[in-house]
Amino acid sequence: MVSVTPRLSLPLLHAGQAQKETDHNEALALIDLALHASVEAVGVNEPPEEPTEGQCWIVGSAPIGAWEGYYNALAGWTAGGWRFLVPRFGMTVTCREDGLVARFEDGNWIVGELHAGAVFVGGTRVVAAQQPAISDPTVGTNVDSSARATLSLVLEALRAHGLIAR
């Protein structure tokens, strides 16, 4: 009976076990895939023909060949061949292909989305939760069409960036 860790399914050693180095080395190979993970690309279905040791991919939704049956897994090439790591909620990786971060959530990889309550730059809060809508300018007693046009463009830019509601 093979016992594994509950989160990453790393093989555990047993007292009196022969060739403990096999399980130990397997666990180290999987840890190497998981810690500070980076992948070449996300959603790849076919293993590359000539991977380099240490390269990883996130397997796509219709894997074939050596990756068949490993949907959404991290596939890493090691000296011993392919190793697969089943992702867990909250796991994040950086993708070399586009520089975006992918996060595993609710059974899927979400690429390029950043979720936060606020954004700080240099210790200063620059973006917070979306604010309520601002009414478009209306005709007043002193009409300045140029100022209204500019204000409308500013409002549209704020809406397009999601900083205020429509």
Image: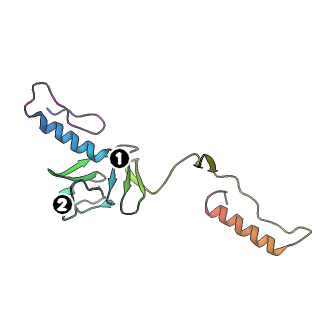
Relative to 106, is 4 above or below?
above
Q: Furthest-bottom residue in view?
A: 145
Q: Furthest-right residue in view?
A: 141
Circle 2 packing at 10 Å, graded few (<14), some (14-19), many (20+), is: few
Magenta portion: prevailing SS class: loop
Q: Residue sitting at 17 percent across and 30 percent down?
A: 13
Residue 8 lies within the magenta run:
yes
How far across and down, in percent of the image, does residue 60 sit? 30, 58
Amino acid type assigned to the residue bearing label 1 in the image:
His
Circle 1 packing at 10 Å, graded few (<14), some (14-19), many (20+), is: few
Can residue 55 be seen? yes
Q: Residue sitting at 23 percent across and 49 percent down?
A: 84
Would you name the residue on which mark 2 appears? 65
Would you name the residue on which mark 1 appears? 36
Relative to 141, is 122 above or below?
above
Q: Earlier in the sequence, mark 2 or mark 1?
A: 1
Q: Residue sitting at 66 percent across and 65 percent down?
A: 157
Q: Nearer the viewer, residue 124 or 162?
A: 124
Q: Residue sitting at 28 percent across and 39 percent down?
A: 8
Contact, mark 2 vs mark 1 (Cβ under 8 Å): no
How far across and down, in percent of the image, does residue 140 sit? 89, 67
Amino acid type assigned to the residue bearing label 2 in the image:
Gly
Question: Considering the image in quadrants, where does the C terminus appear?
Answer: bottom right
Can residue 128 be seen? no
Relative to 49, is 129 above or below?
above
SS at badge 2: helix
How far across and down, in percent of the image, does residue 77 sit? 21, 54
Residues drawn in magenta: 4-18
How far across and down, in percent of the image, does residue 21 sit? 13, 36
SS at badge 1: loop
Q: Nearer the viewer, residue 152 or 28?
A: 28
